[in-house]
Amino acid sequence: MSLVLRSSRIASIRSIGLLATRPATRLFHESPNKLNVTLGTSSLATRSPVSPATPPSRTSTPPASTEYLRSFKLSELLSYFIIGLATLNKPILNLCIKVFPYVPMAVIKAVVYKIYCGGETIEEVKQTGARLSTRGINNMMISLTIEACNGNDNIDPDYIVSETARSVNEILVPHTLKTIAESGKDINSIPPGYVALKPTGFSKDAVNVLKYYNSDPKYAAQFEDLVEKASLVCQNIYDANVKYAKQYPERTAPFVVGVIDAEKYELQEGVYELQRRLYAKFNPLDMPTSIVGTLQMYLSGSSDLLGLEEKLARENNYRLGLKLVRGAYIHSEQARSLIIHKDKDATDKNYNQGISYCIESILANKNNESTIGHLVVASHNAESLTLATHKLTSDNKNKNNVVLGQLLGMADSITHDLIKTNKVDNIIKYVAWGPPLETKEYLLRRLEENGDAVKSDNGFPLAKAAATLLFKRLFRLA
């Protein structure tokens, strides 16, 4: 079977509107408690009943546990104490965001860098992976944080391709194989290693390339080059999966996965086209899924888009890999009221129904036969993560194609609870790494885009808990 779409098929994909304005192929919002709705050309009505997509209503939320802090060193506890002080309340958080660009990198590295970033070099990222393993986090999604979305014209796409491919070979594959060999766990309980590919890092003038790839010949040619560069990394991933699938035939999940990161809404049509090209080349039928694309579920058209993506995958004979996020650009989107859900409850409902549908789709088939082949539940929301966990309690081997992920340094209390209380193995952390200036900009975006989550997760309870443990450690009381 050819892994590349015929030109007529590619043309048909391009001709389909981004959000499918005709009657929705997938209407998540009609029923909060069931998912027997039509998606593409299949219906879940023929499957076993789907449990409610929305968890029980929130009555009272217990304070986040700080038990996870006990596994950290003194220097890390000091960092968490400072983070707690910085997130005491909204005014303090906003002040920190304003002054952050002027803080010397040396101070940032000494205070909070290791909490949120994996390091500057491949060797440092390896050490981060080892530290995560001691906390029961069996793998990670690494991201070289160099991109050209916000005026950074000094990028070298060839360097990014080379370093990203190198990170697959020197970080993810060895780490995954070592964890499989040393964990003592079933081979299918170890999640894959993931590498995040930023489309804006694979081309100069990436904004225009992604916006005008299908309307301007100049940018169309540059887009083809972007696809080729991404394909070089993805070929590396695909080859690794083929190689190690022969060595470990009992494994149903891939060993390493390429994840296409989302960009701002105005660039997403180009990103979706890139994802589809890579799906078609590297996600053949009846094999583990090597490429995962991102859907931002805070977008009001995301449910229809999910239906469209599954329909295209079925029609063009490839498998679909998905990372579902609520949405990383909510504070910076233009015309937000026109493209996102009306409120957080609507977004939460859409997200929970989205992950429910994908999980049910994966579990409904044996081995690697489902159209939706792999899912990353990328969330800091305890209810969504609990919902996903409850749906994965069966002995179905395909459940190993569902992985839960959070950003390094965020939602650590939730991560700890999933591992220690719920005995979850399929959990990863998103680990940004790269040059100091780039990682500093990443840290700033995390404050800007996830400020509310940081504050609710941390603040005074975190500062108090970190200070208490620091005191006990210093005076040898703990």
Image (cartoon, grey):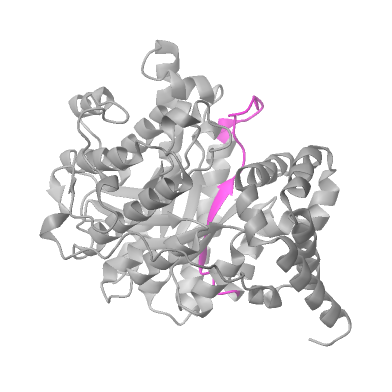
Q: Please identify the residue farthest to the front as the structure is shown.
A: 59
Residue at 30% across, 65% down = 246
> Compared with residue 6, is residue 251 higher up or lower down, i.e. above or below?
below
Work out whether residue 407 or residue 333 is closer to the camera in this orientation and state it: 333
Q: Please identify the residue farthest to the bottom as the structure is shown.
A: 477
Work out whether residue 259 or residue 86 is closer to the camera in this orientation and state it: 86
The x, y position of residue 33, in whole percent, is 27, 59
The x, y position of residue 148, in whole percent, is 59, 29
The x, y position of residue 438, in whole percent, is 69, 40
Q: Quadrant of residue 51?
A: bottom left
Q: Main secondary structure of the magenta part?
A: loop
Query: Which quadrant holds the N terminus?
Result: top left
Residue at 33% across, 51% down = 354
Query: Which quadrant holds the C terminus?
Result: bottom right
Work out whether residue 442 or residue 367 is closer to the camera in this orientation and state it: 442
Image-based side of 302 in relation to 338, left or right: left
Q: Would residue 289 be visible to someone looking at this image?
A: no
Q: Please identify the residue farthest to the left as the structure is shown.
A: 46
Work out whether residue 335 or residue 250 is closer to the camera in this orientation and state it: 335
How many numbered dots are placed on residues in this image?
A: 0
Q: Would residue 358 be visible to someone looking at this image?
A: yes
Image-based side of 356 in relation to 448, left or right: left
Magenta range is 135-158
Q: Please identify the residue farthest to the top as the structure is shown.
A: 217
The x, y position of residue 110, in whole percent, is 82, 56
Q: Is residue 415 magenta?
A: no
> Compared with residue 201, is residue 205 higher up or lower down, i.e. above or below?
above
> Compared with residue 4, is residue 350 higher up or lower down, i.e. above or below?
below
> Compared with residue 477, is residue 178 higher up or lower down, i.e. above or below?
above
